[in-house]
Amino acid sequence: MTPSPSPSAQRATTLARLAAQPFELLIVGGGATGAAVARDAALRGLEVALCDAGDVAGQTSSNSSKLIHGGLRYLQYGDLPLVFEGLGERRRLMRIAPHLCRPIEFLFPGYRGERPGLATLGAGIALYNALALWRPPAESRRVAAHEVYDLAPALRSAGLEGAQIYVDCQTDDARLVLENILDAESAGATCATHLFVEKIVRDRRGRAEAALVIDRETGDRFEIRARLIASATGPFTDGFLGGARRLRPTLGVHLVFDAGRVPHGGRAIVLRSPRDNRLFFVLPAGARTIVGTTDTDFAPLEDPGRPPRVGDEIRARGSDVAYLIEAVRHAFPSLSLGPADVLSTYAGLRPLLAANAQSPSETSREHEIARGPDGVLAIAGGKLTTNRRMAEEAVDRVVETLRAAGLERPLGPCTTAARSLPGGGPLPGVLRAHEFGADVAARIGGAYGSRAGRVLGILGGTPALAARIDPELGYLWAEVVHAARHEHARDLADVLARRVPIFRDARDQGLGVSARAAELIGAELGWDAPRQTVEIQRYREEVERSRRWRTEI
């Protein structure tokens, strides 16, 4: 069997193709939207290129609450079409990627004097399930107060009247995006990360015809030519395209605790902040518990008057952490939680459409697809759950535009609603044959699905790669190698923050294992010792940045 080319050789081939070949569609942005558009367009038969200034899912799309849901709370704003669309997409994702769309129970407690009461909440959940057409996981029930104590013993008991339980889904947001990229490539798309678009090149009529990009690894510049350019730059849309403001970006912050300190019992809990009555979640994440999120208007610290741009400091601030700690202390008074209990934080910007809503929480999660005077197609707004549907609409628009410009060859229909993502097949038997522990098996199966055999195959004659990266967590060193070899990871943070989330889950956020990780990644990507040292320092700076809130609280 001919050995696969090294990641460095693969990247060189990809960059050469991007520089030499004219494409029909260039997508700028490798988050949830861009990845889904690339997949849909390539599967229809278009010649597709995609680039991103950073990693796959490097910003918003890896910093969500990691839920696939219709949005129960959107019912209070009367946004039934958005909820219906989200629930339909949830059902499709359960079918095409069951490993990445996993049903989980949500416990929504009701307290005396709080609105909505349990009866109203129950009616809302019934409507929610009706909008899901009563298909799985549309299940719900009401439980009495004494049953809530059994399910969540640490919950505040004063005034507790009971709870409503319903079912939604959890995901690994970064991996969902990655699998869209991998499927796009299998259909012929040419995708590269760490390529920064310096400017859009326009012809004499002012029409966009290429993107001038900088390879952030080498500093080399070249143009990617395309008949149509689409911006899928998420919260950076206004900063990238300029012109009138399209977005109202808001910051969503999450805190991560040890599950022993904030027990989750394997289910999510929906709670209200005592400060503003806003909903937040307590979410299970294996050995960790995630609490979030905030929803506050965002402005760059350096220049509050301009829109966000790539490179802005997007992190938890002291006020964000204080808000969430206040909320979780109110919900679990007996735990006496404080800043010292926070293991890590993560934060992302929501690309919400600019509207006249009074608060960020009321701002629409709808999306917009519009073509500018230079011909660039801007895809803005939306949410993770509906990214496939949004991409379908965008590619319909792409095809219509290219047809009008003279494209005549036949193209296929949209197939993304029924086509499984790369890991969406049955789990391989080899997964059951390896006895690493229940948490490792759950991790490997849940993260990679039917691709798990490829990860375990890396173990081969290297038993050391079967070891856990951290004794508390179900992550293996083989995953680090796999990320660099097969999953577009190009630096240390790509691996430890998004492919194998040690950055989020380890007590030291991976600082203690960064040297070993850099050594393994470097062996795959051809790093010398100085480059490994640089990567370790950059990673340390990223960890320190995420902890800066401690000096502000």
Image (cartoon, rainbow, N blue to C red):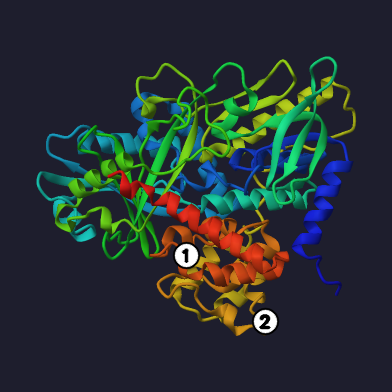
Question: Quarter of the image containing the N terminus?
Answer: bottom right
Residue denoted by label 2: 460
User: Where residue 175 sits: x, y (%)?
Assistant: 57, 54
Would you name the residue on which mark 1 appears? 510
Please identify the residue farthest to the front as the structure is shown.
530
Residue at screen point 60% across, 60% down: 534
**Which amino acid type corresponds to the residue marked 1 in the rendered image?**
Gly
Residue at (64% x, 24% y) in the render: 241
The answer to whether mark 2 and mark 1 are in CB contact below 8 A is: no
Whether 396 is drawn above or below 375: the answer is below
Q: Position of residue 115 (x, y in %)?
A: 20, 32
Q: Is residue 8 visible?
A: yes
Numbered disc in front, either 2 or 1? 1
| Label 1 Cα crowd, 10 Å radius (few <14 / some 14-19 / many 20+) | many
As drawn, 322 above or below 257:
above
Q: Is residue 71 left or right of residue 534?
A: left
Q: Earlier in the sequence, mark 2 or mark 1?
A: 2
Q: Quadrant of residue 402?
A: top right
Q: Position of residue 240 (x, y in %)?
A: 63, 28
Marks 2/1: CA–CA distance: 25 Å
Is residue 140 visible in the rendered image? The answer is no
The image quadrant that residue 378 belongs to is top right
Numbered disc total: 2
